Image (cartoon, rainbow, N blue to C red):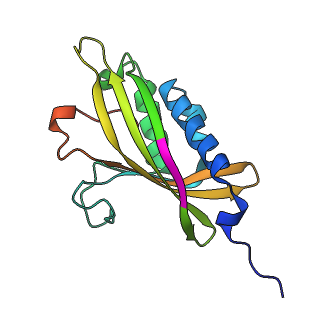
Amino acid sequence: MNKPLDPASTVTRAEVEDLLYHEADLLDAWRLDDWLGLLTDDASYYVPPNDKPDGDHRFTLFTVADDIVRLRERIIRLKDPNCHAEYPPSHTRRLITNVRITGTEGDLVLVAANFAIFRHRRNEQAPRQFVGRYRYKLKQTDSGLKIHERRAILDAEELGAMGAVSFLL
């Protein structure tokens, strides 16, 4: 009798780190179409409220709750010169730390990591800082490891002082 493979045993932390570092590099370079290529065809992207980081977007008001269709639309808008919130695009630098494989959920590998994002905008005196943690659900595909779900949980008590979150956390 063949025992099913544990998805976490088929993926190493180094492979997960490579994916997350590559993702950070693509987003910092504003290579948004290439970033979409890291996602599964049914991917989701969430920025939940701080008081309910594990909340369900169907029953809780999220800052961002995008499926793959909305993500593609978001990318089109962000690249448009008429998108005043991000034209010219922000300059960002993402630092990813404490990457861990935390378990599995069916055929998905659960991953946790911390992040710090420094966002520089024209005509702003100082960079804005976004600090928090990521929760990923990754899937092994024929073309490699892909992001099925990405949840960016901010440590800030409120977004007001950080300004609009018009770019991808």
In depth, the one of 77 and 164 nearer the eye is: 164
Q: Is-magenta flag for residue 59?
A: no
Q: Is residue 12 left or right of residue 39?
A: right
Q: How many marks?
A: 0
Quadrant that contains the N terminus: bottom right
Q: Is residue 132 above or below residue 12?
A: above
The image position of residue 167, as x and y in percent, is 37, 33
Dominant secondary structure of the residues highlighted in magenta in the image:
strand
The image position of residue 87, as x and y in percent, is 36, 18
Q: Residue at x 55, y 71 (%)?
A: 105
- Give residue 73's quadrant in the image: top left
In depth, the one of 98 and 130 nearer the eye is: 98
Can residue 1 be seen from the camera position used here? yes
Q: Residue at x 24, y 11 (%)?
A: 123
Q: Is residue 61 left or right of residue 98?
A: left
Quadrant that contains the C terminus: top left
Q: Which residues are magenta?
A: 97-101
Q: Is residue 4 above or below residue 79?
A: below
- Give residue 107's quadrant in the image: bottom right
Q: Residue at x 53, y 55 (%)?
A: 100
Q: Is residue 147 above or below residue 116?
A: below
The image position of residue 14, as x and y in percent, is 65, 47
Q: Is residue 109 left or right of residue 118?
A: right
Q: Is residue 11 left or right of residue 122?
A: right
Q: Is residue 27 above or below residue 157?
A: above
